[in-house]
Amino acid sequence: MAATTTLQPPHSQLHPAHPAPPHSPTSEGTSRPDVANPLVDVSMLKVLAQRGLVDALNSVNGAKTLVLDPSLAGPLSLVTEVSLLKHHGVDKMFWLEPGPLNAATTHVVYLCRPQIKWMKIVADQIKRLTAGSTTHTYTLILVPRRTSLCDRILEEEGVLGEVNISSYKLELIAIEDDVVSLELENVWREINVDGDDTSIFYAAQALVTIQHAYGLFPRILGKGDGAKKLADLLIRSIPPPSSRTPATLSHTSEVIDSLIIIDRHVDMITPMLTQLTYEGLIDEFFDIQNSHVKVDPALLAPPPAGSASPGTSATPLPTGLPTSTPSQSKRSHHLHSADHLFAQLRGSNFAIVGGKLHKEARRLEVEYKRHHQAQTVSQLRDFVGKLGGLQNEHQALRLHTGLSEEISTRTRTEQFNKSLEIQQNLLQGYDTTSQITGIEDLVAQQAPIQIVLRLLCLANLVTGGIKVRVLENLKREILQTYGYSYVPMLLSLSSLSLLTSLPISKHSKIPSPPAFAPIRKSFRLLSDTLEAAPKDISYVYSGYAPLSVRLVQCVAQKSAILSPAASDNNGRDDKDDAPPNANANSDPPSPLPLPLAHPITGWKGFEDMLKLLPGEVVDRTQHSEGRADTKPAPHQDRPMTTMVFFLGGCTFTEIAALRWMGTQMQGRSFLVGTTGMVNGSSLLQSLGDGPSVAFGPMT
């Protein structure tokens, strides 16, 4: 049997399983620089996911051929390994795609999302196999649930009676020990463009699972129409009290003090901005998918012998042989906090990443020099014992230095800096006419379409709309430059109020975006802070605080908005606090103690500010009887975890801001939940119609 491997997204290689996954107890520690060590252990989600998959596979006895939905390969790589699938009877694997299936086993198992396109492919392959001389049995496992629409499609295709249908309840996946994700695609589009609330139901069921493990959320808060739907559905999903009610659903949680739901559509400015943290820029330029990124194989160690990747529907998994070599394609690398250097860099503004890498290089140089200073057997033995760890650290340094150099090359281009300048000027409300002209210049230069559209949407959001003549000219230039395949996307942007023309007709069905100037002032979105010694979450965008995270602060860190000076106890530059005649060689002054986290009291004090933003306001409490009312939750005099759930997607930069918040107070850590990881390009990509509007990573 081939070496233990992990599933990767399509067309990538399978690599050995990491010895210590990010949610494994062996990889956790109290020294994590970017995580506030949440009380909630999300490793149980991996156990649930593995158990559910094993049960689904074991329902089919004997050897089986697994036909896998390509969009599930990435999420499954975070919860299972190929060796586990083989152990439970999977003989060969194929991608689910059009064309005949060469199944050598009697049992054929399809594992896919409940989507129409997959049902038609499954039906076609079953018809082809049934027409042959070989007898097969077919099992369709739908993720995360079986739907009546899928049954109807299979019935119309005439194969419903030929296939056994079941479901695999894959819900929240731990992508880090403080981040869980449904890893769903196009949720924002489905909710806001298609009017499909299926993903809200999935999110509610996943949050019920969290409550099964840790008890009811004492308080549920949120902002946005989607947040209201999710909160209502979540409360209705709690069964009425009975003798069969799980004990955890009979009382409120003792470790989670609240759930804060942020509807992505409430804050569309943040994803339209270019992320400026290290992990955010990796996502912008290299496109992180399911915590994996494709990099130059020269930056990674040679691939292990015996690795392989799933084949197409015409070619099975070639056991022991890779489908590609490093010289032919980039390799997929898992970005996770077990890489301690990455854990230190990921949430940092990219402006200071170079200095951190230089410091790490100097440290490793000193460690290696100790080898030459070793004179006794004991000293040599100590060095040899550390050698393996030093080599791993050296490899990590090589990888991140290479990534940083490539990012630096791209951030030094004229187009990138021009786009950043336009963003900063738009956020400050400076000469918006000139910024629109700058966007027109980028179109004339044939800058990447995602840069142009993100800037255009940003201009629309911060100005409240664009003059009719100017907007129509811009649309015409975009279509003539990039192609008329972008017409559906532009229409969708208009329907979402991301592109609106001024003046807005009284009879228009397209609502105008909210005025940005009062929002910017009320939520203190612009502030000066040092990237190397941040005093505010605005460091992640070099002066702009994500509105979504400001909303979380309204609930969990009120002083950061009402009295910002009171929250600047930490993250400061100690040199600023030293007396004028202090000796440079003396010990630095001790940092002020972290303030205690205040109890969650809802949106109190921010009611007028919330009215500036679109969508409903949510503030509900849950009690042991499983019903909601408006009584405040009792204050918990112990450390607690606050769960923040992003409906419609979350950026890596927002996670970095929440992690930083967790380091600024005692007694509260954050657990981030999301329907999936997004950025401005992926959100716009979801509005496209077909492969002709594929963006790819920003260049």
Image (tube, helix red, strand yellow):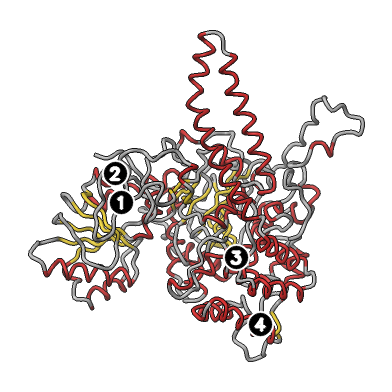
**Quadrant housing the C terminus:** bottom right
Distance from label 3 to label 1 (Cα)? 35 Å
- Mark 4, residue position: 471
Circle 1 residue: 53
Which of discs 2 and 4 lies nearer the camera? The answer is 4
Label 1 packing within 10 angstroms: few (<14), some (14-19), many (20+): many
**Circle 2: residue type:** Leu
Amino acid, disc 3: Val
Secondary structure of residue under mark 1: helix
Q: Residue lying farthest bottom? A: 507
Tell which tag, 3 or 2, sits nearer the viewer.
2
Q: Farthest residue toward the front?
A: 327
Dot 4 and dot 3 residues touching (CB under 8 Å) = no
- Residue occupying the point 71% across, 83% down: 467
State how far apart marks 3 and 2 are (Cα).
43 Å
Q: Where does residue 529 sit, x and y in percent of width and height?
A: 77, 50
- Name the side, left or right, on which 635 lies relative to 168: right
- Residue 463, compared with residue 682, is above or below; it is below
